[in-house]
Amino acid sequence: MKDFFYAIQDLFVNVLFAPLDALRTLELENWWAANFMNWLFMLVGLVAFIYWMGQLKKFNNNNEEDKSISSHSYL
């Protein structure tokens, strides 16, 4: 049973964390390259946000949204 847990440790430490170790060594050389994926995710999020706001503005300008006030009876 002890070998099973050592095998799991070996899998995670030597195989699955290898890309993270590579990023850790790359950070010492070039911070921008090490954070490339973060910048990419932020860029995708920004593009999606701008697209979503454009769609909201388009529907708002066409008055397609139901803006009638309805709330619960106890309010």
Image: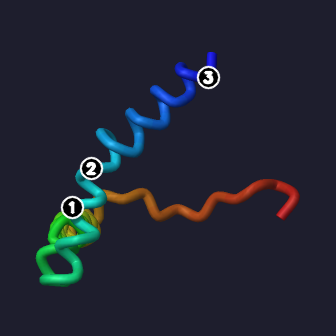
Q: Where is residue 40 in the image (x, y as percent from the top left)?
A: 16, 67
Q: Name the residue under label 3.
A: 2
Give the residue type that dot 3 points to: Lys
Badge 3: residue crowd in 10 Å (few <14, some 14–19, many ≥20): few
CB atoms at circles 1 and 2 under 8 Å apart? yes
- Outermost residue, top direction? 1
* For residue 28, above or below residue 19: below
Q: Which of 35 and 55 is in front in this view?
A: 35
Q: Mark 1 points at which residue?
A: 22
CB atoms at circles 3 and 2 under 8 Å apart? no
In the image, is 15 to the left or to the right of 13?
left
Q: Distance between the residues labelled 1 and 2?
A: 6 Å
Badge 1: residue crowd in 10 Å (few <14, some 14–19, many ≥20): few
User: What residue do we see at 40% from left, 45% from top?
Assistant: 13
Q: Earlier in the sequence, mark 3 or mark 2?
A: 3
Q: Position of residue 69 (x, y in %)?
A: 59, 64
